[in-house]
Amino acid sequence: MARIFCIANQKGGVGKTTTTVNLAAGLGRIGQRVLVVDLDPQGNATMGSGIDKRALELTVYDVLLESASIAEARRRSDKAGYDVLGANRELAGAEVELVELERRDKRLKAAIAAVGDEYDFVLIDCPPSLSLLTLNGLCSAHGVIVPMQCEYFALEGLSDLVNTIKQVHANLNPDLQIIGLLRVMYDPRITLQQQVSEQLKSHFGDKVFNTVIPRNVRLAEAPSYGLPGVVFDPASKGAQAFIDFAQEMVERIKTL
């Protein structure tokens, strides 16, 4: 049965989508079967996996409204090496439509359960707000991976996210836990980043992943080519870090 993880942070621009597609590609490289679920109406994880969101006939929107299954709506990204349940602007409308429906926060969970045996990992790219979409992701998941920049405001946002996860754990999904914090866009030359990194380790201990993702131009360029950085330039420092992170994830889930 697949291990299901949300990549979430209520702060925007922290590299959630970059983390999702590169972790997926890294896991694919080491022989894992991966499904990426794009829960963000911007559809960046879809485009970053080489799939044209405008050309999709079925998306995660149809799955949430139960007019299609994941098996019908998913697409294979041959270049990236994993399956994608894509999203586009239609998904923004799902917020309003879901409010009226039964089991509105558990629909993604039911859909993933139908294909769970076909994957080792399901990675859910969440939007940066706490919405019904994010809630569907959190209710589906075994755990949350939190990408974080080592900056002061990131610590502020983290406390909000931890509180949200605690509430979902208490009321909706007793399986949910923080799997780990991933330090991204890290520049060791900046003293503040070193200090925040140390604060994270002292406060969260072994919840902080050992792998650190460096600030890397090749990772930033990759989406414009419709590829994860791990595929676009496998030799780059950023790609190597994500492959290391994929291996660390495989090891970490053995201990859960």
Image (spheres, rainbow, N blue to C red):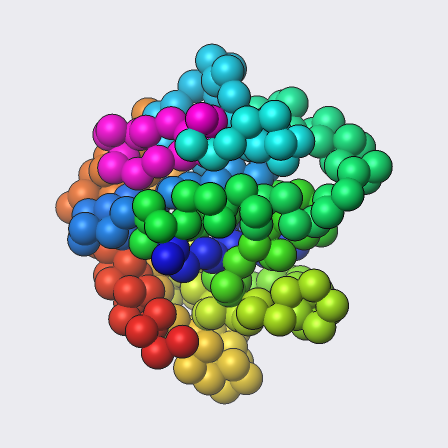
Q: Residue at x 42, y 82 (%)?
A: 206
Tell me, yes or no, whether the highlighted magenta stretch contains residue 156.
Answer: no
Q: Is residue 134 visible?
A: no
Tell me, yes or no, whether the highlighted magenta stretch contains residue 77.
Answer: yes
Left or right: where 156 falls relative to 181: right
| Looking at the image, residue 203 lies above or below residue 169 | below
Q: Residue at x 54, y 84 (%)?
A: 203
Q: Residue at x 60, y 63 (%)?
A: 154
Left or right: where 207 falls relative to 81: right
The one nearer the camera, 106 or 157, is: 106
> On the rendered image, what quadrant is the C terminus found in?
bottom left
Residue 61: image location, x then y, percent? 61, 29
Q: Residue at x 31, y 73 (%)?
A: 254
Residue 8: image location, x then y, percent? 56, 55
| Looking at the image, residue 29 lies above or below residue 187 | above
Identify the magenta region. 72-87
Residue 106: image location, x then y, percent? 65, 50
> On the rendered image, what quadrant is the N terminus found in?
bottom left
